[in-house]
Image (cartoon, helix red, strand yellow):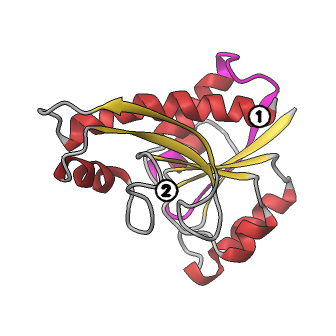
């Protein structure tokens, strides 16, 4: 049985999709051994309500957050760490220790619209403001350099002239779910 840990900061949309894929046997021989957040958020509430092993580290000094996450992971080391809307930037030591075992889903076609401060609706607003014709999502390895790790999988979609950041966000959300699950299957099978 392969183990994954999921790091979250918000609603947990992609986390829930992973859990659903496990329950529906789309992801087989995979278990979620921990869910960790950098703040108390709906994703953690959901995990706790569903009796999952969940940890909220909102009271930890941000300087020590990567170390605390590492300490939690070392108690039951996962085969893969998935950043699912996780907003905290993990430090260099953490990224090197877990080299090629941490993946992230990003709501753009990296390297475009990546880096510090580029997440969620901010990405979609920038894409629309720049009058891009295509966008998409990317799953990539996490390194010390934000959103610059090797690309595992990406998929694009066209942008209509009437597209809004909200409509683009919904379109990208479907792509994220698809390529995140495909990436987990590819990496753990």
Picture coordinates of residue 47 (x, y %)? 59, 42
Please tell me whether mark 1 sits on a helix, a strand or a loop. Answer: strand
Quadrant, the C terminus: top right
Left-right relation of 61 to 87: right
Query: 178 or 111, which lies in front?
Result: 111
Residue at position x 26%, y 49% from top? 127
Task: Say whether disc 1 or disc 2 marks the residue closer to the N-terminus.
Answer: 2
Picture coordinates of residue 57 (x, y %)? 59, 67
Q: Is residue 33 magenta?
A: yes
Q: Which residue is mark 1?
A: 31
Determine which quarter of the picture holds residue 71.
bottom right
Left-right relation of 59 to 130: right
Quadrant, the N terminus: top right
Query: 131 or 21, which lies in front?
Result: 131
Please tell me whether mark 2 sits on a helix, a strand or a loop. Answer: loop
Q: Is residue 20 magenta?
A: no
Picture coordinates of residue 61 (x, y %)? 58, 81
Q: Dot 2, how many residues are within 10 Å of its Cα: few (below 14), some (14-19), or many (20+)?
A: many
Residue at position x 52%, y 41% from top? 46
Residue at position x 66%, y 21% from top? 23
Determine which quarter of the picture holds residue 51.
top right
Which region of the structure is painted magenta? 23-43
Residue at position x 55%, y 74% from top? 59
Q: Which residue is mark 2?
A: 9
């Amino acid at each position: 049985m392969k183990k994954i840990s999921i790091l979250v900061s918000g609603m947990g949309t992609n986390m829930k999709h992973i859990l659903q894929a496990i329950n529906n046997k789309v992801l087989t021989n995979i278990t979620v051994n921990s869910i960790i957040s950098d703040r108390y958020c709906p994703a953690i509430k959901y995990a706790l309500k569903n009796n999952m092993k969940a940890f909220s580290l909102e009271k930890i000094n941000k300087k020590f957050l990567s170390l605390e996450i590492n300490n939690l992971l070392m108690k039951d080391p996962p085969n893969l760490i998935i950043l699912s809307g996780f907003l905290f930037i993990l430090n260099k030591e953490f990224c090197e220790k877990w080299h090629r075992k941490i993946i992230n889903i990003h709501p753009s076609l990296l390297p475009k619209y990546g880096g510090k401060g580029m997440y969620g609706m901010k990405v979609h607003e920038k894409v629309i403001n720049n009058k891009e014709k295509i966008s998409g999502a990317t799953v990539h390895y996490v390194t010390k350099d934000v959103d610059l790790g090797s690309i595992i999988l990406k998929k694009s979609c066209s942008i209509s002239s009437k597209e809004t950041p909200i409509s683009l966000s919904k379109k990208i959300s479907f792509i994220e779910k698809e390529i995140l699950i495909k990436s987990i299957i590819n990496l753990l099978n």
